Image (tube, rainbow, N blue to C red):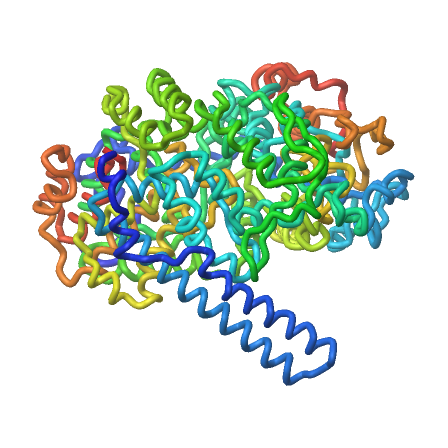
Amino acid sequence: MGNGLTRRQVLWRAGALGCSAAASPLLTPLSFASAPWDNRLVAIILRGGMDGLDICRPVGDSEFAGLRPGLSEGGVPLDGFFELHPDLADLEPLWQAQELAFVHATSTPYRDKRSHFDGQDLLEAGTAALGSSVGRDGWLNRMLAEVPGAVAETAYAIGREEMLLMAGAAPVSGWWPDLDITLSAQGLRLLEATLRDDPAMAEAMAQAVLLADSDGSGVIADSDAPGAAMTAMTGDMQAATSGKPGQAHLRIAEFTARKLREETRVAAFSLSGWDSHSNQAQSLRRPLRQLSQVLNGLRDGLGPNVWGKTTVIAMTEFGRTARINGTGGTDHGTGGTMILAGGALRGGRVLGHWPGLAEGDLHARRDLMPTSDVRSWTAWILRESFGLSQERLEREVFPGLDMGSAQGILR
Amino acid sequence: MVSRLAGEDEMGARFPIPEFSEFLPRFAAFQEARKARKAARRDGDAAAVRDAQDALRSMVREVRRAQTDWARQTVLRRCETHDGFRERLVQFWGDHFTARGKAPLLREAQALYVEESIRPHVSGRFGEMLYAVVTSPLMLHYLDQNRSFGPNSAIAQRKPQAGLNENLARELLELHTLGVDGSYGQNDVRALAELLTGLRFTAEQGFRFHPKLAEPGQATVLGKRYGGPEPALSDIRAVLDDLVRHPATARHIARKLAVHFVADQPDPALVAAMAARFSETEGDLIQVYEAMLSHPAAWRRDGPGNVKQPLAFVTSGLRALGVGQAHLRRMDRRGFHQRLIAPMEVMGQPWQEPEGPDGWAEADSHWITPQGMAARLQWAMAAPRLMLPRLPDPRDFVEHALGSEAPETVRRAAGASETRWEGVGLVLISPAFQRHG
């Protein structure tokens, strides 16, 4: 085969050779239909149990300073009662622009066992309880299934981690990082044949082939250039692994912004490192920096127009203990905090009902008492952003949820 | 399989990796150098700060190099062994009891923890492994036990900010023994955390039990009281022994083994048989493996086999290709990293760095992702040519790699490819090769 074949040329040639597109999972082009709506949603899973009491500090509560010696000073004033963690000071302009909000004392229905893994599963499944259905699909995927016209390009699960909230029957795309695939047209057809009996592998490979070209650099090359595959592998491996540690979040924010400026409407990824069992002042520094860089990076990368249509929801599996523990950190708790951002938001507010921090007001005398369900806030954002009906949200997206009354979260 | 396991650990002897205890003096020297740097900074002695800085840097460099050598030994063991089940078990149990370093030098030392606290016990008793893990410096460090104090301990009387940390106690119940469905509650976590206080390690002495840091008095875990007025290591041993005997532990371990070695959704009868054997023998692991391997459900082919995790995929690829010991040893560290370690990371398994204490995901869906498949394909197409002077004929390679059960589609693909490298790559990327048979 000649030099410089692009993927599309390969597709065309394969078609000419008589491959039926329908029977050819590796060679089915993406449908780039116009997105069915215009607003954008970014869901961020903060893995590890973010300490909401440290992020958005209730300094106006008379109990707070006593529970948190060493973790209560130096915050950025927000509304007189709450202060922002000093390492999130870069987010103050967002707050001033009313593009940042917090929901306090909120949680999933998960209680008392305080396992990260179960907590995250429930958060992403969006169901009322753990059970056999958990792990099958996620609430964001079920939301996509409710919207007519959603195609794979509409939604992206980004990053190396599995994103259960995006898993399910509705088509979604995945990305991390861009890997080029170097194969001859013949090789590609044989690959398809060997994978045919293994639907899971065939489907993942079909997506990989399409994604390899998504930034324009991935080319299914010909075998006349014997070094190409090796160069591609070592180059990609280097790009994927030698980036400065802790920089992946910047690439994720950049990719998310790029996709949302185009056909994509929904993106999800995770930021981890929140499990601050000890020396929290130090150990939260990196995740906090990453979080503020990601939020500011999304705003800058999206530009004023798209940012104005965007809502970011950052949620975590549970909050942490009200009291600091014996090692300058906090242990797994219950009530936590959601972070909302975006130009679509009516921000500059701390939402939710504040339960207080007196010992009798705590859950099990140790954790912030949840006074709302993370899923209700999320459901209202989906309602206001994408126009889904309350009935569908309560039945299909978050089965069994009672959303309560309208919240007016967005502008 | 099981009889080999009962015999000598041949690969351990042929490709040695030091134990964590042997590494402690290095860690102690590192701590000393840090103290020296701190003192020099305090005294404003710029030259001394520089010296200490250099010493620290060279120690980190050295241990990073050693880490690659330990990784190479791990790969060699898998490539050269006739006792593959043992290597898979070491990986399984090292993952079940995931511990990672969170500070310089410790970050690189995970293989040494596995060598000391896991490997000798994979053919022994679960309880011995559990005890080894709970008293291992790296686990005490990873799950913050090294910083947990009994709230009423002698030390806490003088340092009121010193207190309890629940991290190890919680994961011990949730991940290591009962499983998250086990019937324990927050009170059990808390009581176990109190019992575990006193477990410590220092760079100079390794593991020690410190009664002065431990919570005095009794604690009730799962309805049973442990401990007396004086804290003692034997109380910790006692609670661990009871956890080993708990039926939830037998079920949890049986199921996890079956999920890993048989299928994502194992036959409940298989799990029940293994759990029963675990309980009867109080965690004699060879017996439990035997119950698994002798059960017809373990050999039934009613679904695709489990997908090989990247380490297994890459090392079984090396075996099939016959990339021998000589070649693996000749590869310089950079080459080893580029050809094996970096690709595994892109496939989703950065070397010995699972995200959390629950270790690597078992579900096939976690590994069969577009990114993972792209990375596997890239490796299958490129790595053999980087490692072998001459690639095998794909038609021979398919027989060699997959044997007489090679699917017809793979045979045909190997024969029909335009080039040797594509033919070989197609065999490696075929589902038959990527899944455990």
Q: Note whether B44 is above or below A258 in the view shown.
A: below
For residue B202, side relative to residue B24 (left or right): right
Residue beneath the point at 36% across and 56% down: B341
Instruction: Look at the image and tell me in which quarter the N terminus of chain B lies.
Output: top left
Instruction: Find residue B239 and report its horizontal and vertical position in percent.
Output: 57, 31
Residue beneath the point at 54% across and 23% down: B182
Corner quadrant of residue A32: top left
Corner quadrant of residue A3: bottom left
Q: Note whether B166 is above or below B347 in the view shown.
A: above
For residue A356, side relative to residue A32 (left or right): right
Corner quadrant of residue A43: top right
Q: Is residue A309 visible?
A: no
Q: Is residue A331 visible?
A: yes
Residue beneath the point at 35% across and 27% down: B258
Q: Closer to the camera, B289 or B102?
A: B289
Instruction: Find residue B45 and report its horizontal and vertical position in percent.
Output: 69, 83
